Image (cartoon, rainbow, N blue to C red):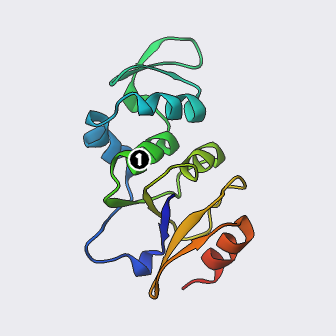
């Protein structure tokens, strides 16, 4: 399950990535494998043809993988870089739903972005990691935590 951080509480030994599009194009693209195909299909309705190409959902044309949406790139960044924290403010609802289904990863945002389908998520607090298992509980923590 993912771990959520508030920007003011990010540990000094962890790096926060805000520019997900650039980070994906520069670093994550070289890490992707078959696991990315399902995520690309769910979020962007595209087919992964190779590590560097996708089939366009609009006309079936072959596109460079850098044409994925920023939300899709963000989820792939989280999946393939578990040692970093990624800002999720540019994710749409479809990316948020997939993000909350990941087995691992670290995210942050200045405001609550919670999937209605979330089952569990960890939150980082000054007192340690807590697990939250309901949309309402997580949204309340995110809204009230300073």
| Residue at image coords 40%, 27% | 34
Q: Is disc 1 placed on a helix, strand or loop?
A: helix
Horizontal arrangement in the rendering, residue 135 relative to residue 26 (left or right): right
* Position of residue 75 measured from the top left corner of the image (x, y, whole percent): 47, 46
- Badge 1 density bin: few <14, some 14–19, many ≥20, Cα 10 Å: many
Q: Is residue 146 above or below residue 82?
A: below
The image quadrant where one finds the C terminus is bottom right
Horizontal arrangement in the rendering, residue 42 relative to residue 13 (left or right): right
* Position of residue 60 measured from the top left corner of the image (x, y, whole percent): 54, 11
Q: Quadrant of residue 64?
A: top left
* Position of residue 77 measured from the top left corner of the image (x, y, whole percent): 38, 47
The residue closer to the viewer here, 19 or 114, is 114
| Residue at image coords 35%, 55% | 82
| Residue at image coords 66%, 56% | 118
Counting the numbered discs, the total is: 1
Q: Quadrant of residue 42?
A: top right
* Position of residue 96 measured from the top left corner of the image (x, y, whole percent): 59, 50
Q: Quadrant of residue 143?
A: bottom right
Q: Is residue 15 above or below residue 48?
A: below
Q: Is residue 2 above or below residue 93?
A: below
Q: Which residue is mark 1?
A: 79
| Residue at image coords 48%, 75% | 6
Q: Is residue 56 above or below residue 102?
A: above
């Amino acid at each position: 399950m993912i771990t959520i951080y508030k920007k003011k509480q990010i540990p000094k030994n962890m790096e926060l990535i805000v520019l997900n599009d650039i980070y994906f194009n520069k670093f994550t693209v070289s890490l992707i494998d078959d696991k990315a195909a399902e995520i690309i299909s769910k979020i962007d309705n595209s087919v992964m043809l190779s590590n560097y190409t996708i089939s366009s959902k609009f006309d079936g044309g072959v596109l460079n993988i850098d044409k994925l949406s920023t939300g899709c790139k963000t989820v792939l960044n989280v999946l393939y870089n578990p040692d970093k924290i990624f800002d999720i403010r540019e994710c749409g609802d479809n990316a948020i739903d997939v993000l909350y289904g990941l087995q691992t990863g670290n995210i942050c945002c200045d405001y609550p972005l919670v999937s209605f389908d979330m089952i569990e998520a960890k939150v980082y607090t000054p007192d340690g990691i807590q697990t939250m298992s309901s949309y309402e509980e997580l949204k309340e923590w995110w809204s009230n935590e300073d």
